[in-house]
Image (tube, grey):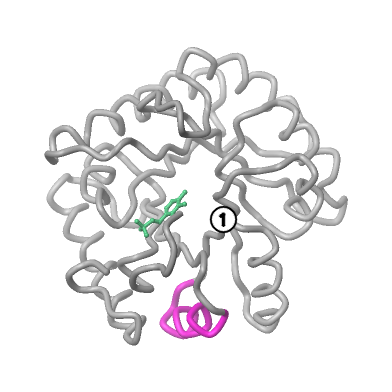
Amino acid sequence: MTDQANANNIASNLTRVREQIRQSCEQHQKNPEKVTLLAVSKTKPAEALREAWHAGQRDFGENYLQESLEKQAVLQDLEICWHFIGPIQSNKTRSIAESFQWVHSVDRLKIAQRLSDQRPDQLPALNICLQINISEEDSKSGITLAQLPELARQIARLPNLTLRGLMAIPAPAATPEAQRKPFQALQQALTQLQAEHPEMDTLSMGMSGDMDAAIAEGSTMVRIGTAIFGARNYAT
Ligand SMILES: *Cc1c(COP(=O)(O)O)cnc(C)c1O
């Protein structure tokens, strides 16, 4: 658990996180209206999400398909924007295409192609972020920055997807300055892509431990789990 997060107090945790976002924006001269708070609810029960919803939270990020579908069934009465942020197996793409509005973790054309093919006709285009392995760690999913322009070009052509931006989970860094470096590289990559893909407007970056650094470098979507819901019971 972080210093302040208290699993019994989701509403006050949310208030505190929103206030931290506001302060970071003020300090780094960013517009707080451009930073969406995505509540990462993996491993947390549906009732925790309901509590966050009643405290005004609308965007939720989930990593595990089956777990998320179970919660979505229980929370059908609530208007929620669901984001898939975990690794994607190709045999799971149909359910993802049917049940989410955003996918942040696309790193292969094959997966994108399937999501586009399987997106139901009556739903709007699925919003896509490409996951970048920004610290080039062997253990992490994502493409390199060198692979990015070509994959973006291919995915932008798919009919039932809208390519919105980039997502990354940088390796832990010791200092605030070191935390900013990979986020800055991601921001620069997005700026370059925007010349060809003006619809790309999203930088999905920043978690409980590095949110301020991400906002300093232009994050438009911070993915916050622990600081809202408390520590998770198993490592992910
Ligand atoms: C779990 C997770 C988060 C949230 O991490 P916290 O440190 O709990 O805020 C954000 N993004 C992704 C992709 C995750 O898997």
**Main SS, magenta residues:** helix
**Which residue position holds label 1?**
63
User: Can you say whether 193 is above or below 218 in the image?
Assistant: above
* Label 1 C-beta lies within 8 Å of the nearest ligand 1 atom: yes
Left or right: residue 187 compared with residue 196: left
- Ligand 1, image quadrant it occupies: bottom left
Q: Which residue appears farthest toward the front when viewing the image?
A: 234
Residue 81 position, x and y percent, is 59, 64
**In magenta stretch: residue 54:** yes
Quadrant in the picture for residue 105: top right
Classify residue 226 as left or right of residue 144. left
Image quadrant for the N terminus?
bottom left
Left or right: 71, with 60 as reference point: right
Residue at horizontal 55 percent and vertical 38 percent from the top? 129
Which quarter of the figure has residue 14? bottom left
| Range shown magenta | 46-57
Name the image quarter holding residue 151: top right
Query: What is the x, y in percent for residue 138?
Result: 45, 26
Image location (x, y in percent) of residue 195: 49, 18
Q: Residue at x 38, y 44 (%)?
A: 205
